[in-house]
Image: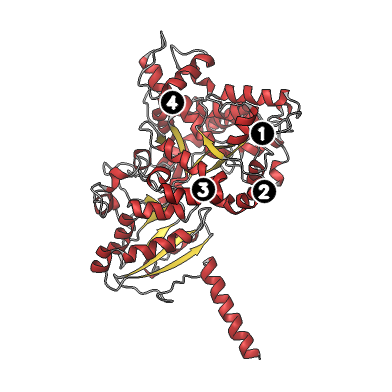
């Protein structure tokens, strides 16, 4: 009896481990082999599920070219939700047996020689069965954010490719917006006007009996929006220059970057949004975990929140249940409104009303303004701002250790993942999530899309809309990799280098955006710029 119980318990433990990533399991082997036909893959389970990986690994093995090239193909998976697991295994050096990591931030290994440079072996190769080069099928905004150029070198490395899109932004209840007669705001000032309108209803609308508009949870994702607003205001060049200690005049190692106001304008947006006196924000939000917080958007208890395309997969099961209760609202993602203060930087667009008109022209596909007096330079500047998006692709790295015994197999699997076939399977088995390629699940696989849409229409639409946004040629994904100045120098935009939670700072203290901005200036200029000088020295810039 005890033996029988122990045997069953062992089987249950094994099944649990296979399902939840205590160690890897598949139907082909239980022990990873260290040869060129065996692929061991690690996946960080971070909001997109893991079913898609098993499906793709199996389908990859069924391709005729794979059978011919790798007649003894086997795979092995390790899946868990530990965001440092990939880095920890890489740190083990050649005792690590994982051939392909689909994990979080691995930038600390870039340029060290420990990862395969994918530029020629992947990005310059043809997608299997398709007449297109891998990098050309990838969305330009994503590809342009992947290169890594070590300080002092002219060579750019491409040692990673994303295993998901990870697009962050403002997710909103589209159905509720339409019922209430609300339009998606184009500027931050228009967003505040919209929220003032909601407040003016005093909670007397049957469809939405609340006065606040913005909701959050314990995980706010507000930090995803901060750099977007900052880069909108400063422009991409000056935003990136700040991170390299280059001021607006092109002077290197310049302490004048501290006086750049882009981050101030971004903080001012959040300071105003979260000020209790303004009543825009549901202040009970921090008491909810992220799933409960996101549920409020589906349950019509909030109009919008900062989140990302992972919302679809994380909420699919709850959304299906809510649908049975009569909640079937469509959730989508809006383009981040342009920070209204950008007019400070423009010569011919000085009002928010005119700024909104120019944004309408850009959204309609115009390449110049038909509005009298609007210069091409200002139009292009607004167009750049309209196209800035935040992606988690710098925290969804796919890398191959240089010592892997199955490097070629791992590379070929990544090539396969760019195929239309793999994109369809990925979307079907990740609640419509998108890989970083020019592939539209809604139009290129309409039957599969409609089948999935029948069960989770409220969340699937979000993915489709994100995909459409990214197909616009002027879209830019912010490159948020740490520069040497920040990584080695220890430079931080806050006075306290351990700080960074501006959201709770604004919610729970009297600290203002201006206070944060000035505190950083005071911190780095104190004692004759001592801390600033130390950052430059630690980064090797002096």
Residue corresponding to mark 1: 506
First in residue order: circle 3 vs circle 4:
4
- Whole-angstrom CA distance, mark 3 to mark 2, is 23 Å
Closer to the eye: label 3 or 2: 3
First in residue order: circle 2 vs circle 4:
2
- Whole-angstrom CA distance, mark 3 to mark 4, is 27 Å
532 and 313: which one is in front? 313
First in residue order: circle 4 vs circle 1:
4
162 and 519: which one is in front? 162
Q: Is residue 145 left or right of residue 6?
A: left
Q: Residue at x 66, y 34 (%)?
A: 506
- Whole-angstrom CA distance, mark 2 to mark 1, is 22 Å
Dividing the image into 4 quarters, which one contains the N terminus? bottom right
Asked which secondary structure carries label 3, the reply is: helix
For residue 453, the mark is 3
Mark 3 residue crowding within 10 angstroms, few (<14) / some (14–19) / many (20+): some
For residue 363, the mark is 4
As drawn, which residue projects farthest toward the top?
372
Q: Is residue 203 left or right of residue 477?
A: right
Q: Residue at x 41, y 33 (%)?
A: 240
**Pointers 2 and 4 in contact (C-beta within 8 Å):** no
Residue 59: quarter of image? bottom left
x and y, in percent, of residue 539 in the image: 41, 42
- Whole-angstrom CA distance, mark 2 to mark 4, is 34 Å
x and y, in percent, of residue 88 in the image: 47, 62
Closer to the eye: label 2 or 1: 2
Residue 109 to residue 14: above or below = above
């Amino acid at each position: 009896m005890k033996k029988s119980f122990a045997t069953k318990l062992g089987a249950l433990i094994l099944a649990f481990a296979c399902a939840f990533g205590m160690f890897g399991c598949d139907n082909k082997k239980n022990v990873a082999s260290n040869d060129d036909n065996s692929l061991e893959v690690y996946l960080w389970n971070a909001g997109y599920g893991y079913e898609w990986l098993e499906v793709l690994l199996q389908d990859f093995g069924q391709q005729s070219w794979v059978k011919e090239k790798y007649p003894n193909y086997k795979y092995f998976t390790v899946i868990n939700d530990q965001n440092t697991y990939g880095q920890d295994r890489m740190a083990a050096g050649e005792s690590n047996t994982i051939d392909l990591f689909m994990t979080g931030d691995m930038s600390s290994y870039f340029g060290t020689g420990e990862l395969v440079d994918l530029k020629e072996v992947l990005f310059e190769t043809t997608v299997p069965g398709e007449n297109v080069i891998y990098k050309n099928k990838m969305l330009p905004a994503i590809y342009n954010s992947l290169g890594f150029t070590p300080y002092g070198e002219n060579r750019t490395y491409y040692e990673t490719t994303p295993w998901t899109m990870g697009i962050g932004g403002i997710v909103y209840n589209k159905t509720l917006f339409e019922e209430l007669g609300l339009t998606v705001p184009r500027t931050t000032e228009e967003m505040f006007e919209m929220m003032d309108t909601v407040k003016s209803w005093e909670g007397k609308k049957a469809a939405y009996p609340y006065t606040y508009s913005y909701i959050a949870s314990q995980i706010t994702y507000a930090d995803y929006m901060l750099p977007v607003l900052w880069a909108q205001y400063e422009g991409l060049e000056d935003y990136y220059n700040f991170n390299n200690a280059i001021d607006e005049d092109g002077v290197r190692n310049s302490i004048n970057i501290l006086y750049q106001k882009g981050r101030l304008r971004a903080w001012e947006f959040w300071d105003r949004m979260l000020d209790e006196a303004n009543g825009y924000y549901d202040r009970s939000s921090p008491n909810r975990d992220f799933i409960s917080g996101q549920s409020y958007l589906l349950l019509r208890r909030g109009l919008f929140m900062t989140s990302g395309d992972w919302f679809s997969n994380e909420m699919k099961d709850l959304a299906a249940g809510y649908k049975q209760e009569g909640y079937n609202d469509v959730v989508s993602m809006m383009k981040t409104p342009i920070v209204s203060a950008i007019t400070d930087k423009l010569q011919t667009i000085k009002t928010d009303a005119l700024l909104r008109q120019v944004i309408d022209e850009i959204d309609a596909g115009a390449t110049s303004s038909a509005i009298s007096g609007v210069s091409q330079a200002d139009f292009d500047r607004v167009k750049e701002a309209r196209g800035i998006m935040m992606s988690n692709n710098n925290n969804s790295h796919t890398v191959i250790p240089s010592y892997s015994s199955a490097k070629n197999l791992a590379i070929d699997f990544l090539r396969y993942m760019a195929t239309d076939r793999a994109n369809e399977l990925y979307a079907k088995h990740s609640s419509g999530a998108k890989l970083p390629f020019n592939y539209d699940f809604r139009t290129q696989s309409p039957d599969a899309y409609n089948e999935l849409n029948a069960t989770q229409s409220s969340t699937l639409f979000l993915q489709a809309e994100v995909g459409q946004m990214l197909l616009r040629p002027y879209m830019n994904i912010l490159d948020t990799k740490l520069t040497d100045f920040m990584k080695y120098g220890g430079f931080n935009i806050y006075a306290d280098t351990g700080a960074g939670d501006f959201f709770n700072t604004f919610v729970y203290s009297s600290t203002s955006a201006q206070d944060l901005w000035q505190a950083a200036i005071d911190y780095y200029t104190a004692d004759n710029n001592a801390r600033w000088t130390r950052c430059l020295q630690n980064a090797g810039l002096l």
